[in-house]
Image (cartoon, helix red, strand yellow):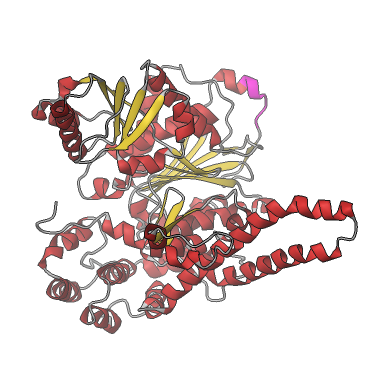
Amino acid sequence: MVQKMTGGKVDFALIKEATRIELVKLLDSIPGTKAVVWDEKLAGAFSHVADYAFLRTHDVCKMFYITANKLPPSNVAHIIFLARPHTSIMDQINQQLRMEDLQGSTKKDYHLWLVPRISLLCERRLQEHGVRGSFTTVRELPLLLFRLDCDLVSMELPLCFRDLQLDSDPTSVFLVAQALMTIQGVFGLIPNIYGKGQSAKQVYELMVRMRREMGGNEPQVTPQIDQLILIDRSVDLITPLATQLTYDGLIDQFYGINNCTVKLPGEKFAQTSSDSPPSDDSSFMDTKTVQLSSLEILYAEIRDCNFSAVGPRLSRHAKSVKAQYEERHAAKTVGELKQFVQKIPQMEVHKQSVATHTTIAELIQEQIASGIFRPALQMEQEFLKGLDTDKISPFIEDCIAQKESLNTVLRLICLQCIVNSGLKPKILEHYKRDVIHTYGFEHFLTLENLEKAGLLYVQQGRSTYATVRKTMQLTVDDVSEHDPTDMSYVHSGYAPLSARLVEFLQWPGWRAITGVLQVLPGPTLTETQQLPSALRQRRGSVGSVQSGGEGGTALVFFIGGCTHSEIAALRFLSSRVDQGGPEYVIATTKIINGNSFLQYLSDELGGE
């Protein structure tokens, strides 16, 4: 039985507020003026918690980056190094502290805040450098979740999948469990927990232990989330290898979206800015940073669309902008002119939005039309349909011979391997030998890592993909990209396995697909958490629905990363809430794409 108890919308803005409270506690524990020295990789994610204006209200006067160079002069009482717990960053902090001593600058108190937790390895490294005693305080700042949208949070742990699969490092699992305890502290206990995969089981077991250690001192918050669905990335390795075909997905694939911003070629945007004079600053021409926010009406409309549907929508908005400006000719009276003038600022914002996204769409179209994007996509979709997966692919051989992008080559080889449940030894060795000969022996470690991570392996038995594909309806032939009726539109015919698992949980329920769950890796989780008696009394009588449930809110948590296509697929399911399904909110250790997924697993011989 699944308890249904929510009717309101869950908004992760509350997570942001809870995170800010933790930050303010630490900032206010240090009286006086402060400078923050940022780990550059952390600064972008931190912008979702607090901007400079907010930090200034808590006496932060200066901000710098952690580098191998000396710190700029600053007349502050305290310097706070805010960093991830990586030993390489400790090495840079050591250099900056040494240079501060050499400068003989006015005495300051140094503080080290590690996000999200203190690392003994980092403390040991600082002791080896002889600078551990330079810090007045070394503390942890438990920022576990960064709000990217009202329905989306990320832990910004890009190496989670690598740590779990290659290094058997369980730290990420512990942090995910902590993050979920934070979510339950804000939104109440989640009564129904489902999961698939080894990491999903480990996270649940840690949650049980953490809850037991609280000894009944849990926050008495009325539950707002009905279900937690834990998805281990290793359960679905196909989706991150498949080309995303949504607007967001393609932006990320080609240019990389980081903390809701994307850097694009600046010269393309110089042409669209007719209101401002040309800039003499060549740095403006190099890159243009665009903020991608759902508060922008146009972006919110097109971000999850299949790219083929974006052009017509942009055209419609462009015509709407033109029609709005034409209204000035219809204004006859002073009152009508005044009304038109009042609308101009909003019209200008809309006009700029249309211009920006039209330029981005043109950039994407150029990328699609160039190189091997289209033939590689066709090869990929043939693999997803189970065609010719048990033999050497002439297309992959041609790509290697032409020395196309190694990421593209590895992505296709791994995809072929997974849908075929492994490759015959001769085929696998043939691919590996060709890659080493063409791209260099330094990629040998990357191939080894892909094997350890379960992306490349020798076939042990018959392929199970055909059964999974048919039962879960992973491929759809007649998919509508402009007016979708199925989530498979996000890959133009392929539905993400992870999102299908979520969909099938609601209806017809996981009991109907036990055969598929048995062949997918890792254990299957179906658990309940009993509400404290005080909360049961506060809520009064609680309705219940059969397994699968109707309505309410479900949190889908990806352990090891998720793609923009999976986010779009789950938002598509949320849009059908009138059909009785829940509204989905999403948490992930990191948003990934086919390129970044493989890059996080890559190593080079002789590399750092």
> Where are the magenta residues, as a range?
537-542
Residue 493 seen by the camera: no
Return the residue nearer the eye: 567 or 258. 258
Q: In the drawing, does residue 6 fall left or right of residue 276? A: right
Place of residue 449 in the rendered image (x, y in percent of width and height, measured from the top left): 19, 57
Return the residue nearer the eye: 404 or 106. 106
Place of residue 156 in the rendered image (x, y in percent of width and height, measured from the top left): 37, 43
Residue 276 seen by the camera: yes
Does residue 540 show up magenta in the picture?
yes
- The picture quadrant where one finds residue 297 is bottom right
Q: Is residue 334 above or below residue 140?
A: below
Q: Is residue 79 above or below residue 266?
A: above
Q: In the drawing, does residue 428 fall left or right of residue 499? A: left
Q: Is residue 267 above or below residue 542?
A: below
Place of residue 372 in the rendered image (x, y in percent of width and height, measured from the top left): 35, 79
Q: In the drawing, does residue 7 fall left or right of residue 416? A: right
Please name the residue shown 56% across and 45% down the image: 547
Please name the residue shown 35% across and 47% down the image: 523
- The picture quadrant where one finds residue 287 is bottom left
Does residue 175 show up magenta in the picture?
no
Place of residue 379 in the rendered image (x, y in percent of width and height, measured from the top left): 37, 78
- The picture quadrant where one finds residue 24 is top left
Please name the residue shown 62% across and 67% down the image: 314
Please name the residue shown 32% across and 68% down the image: 415
Q: Residue furthest right?
A: 333
Return the residue nearer the eye: 398 or 108. 108
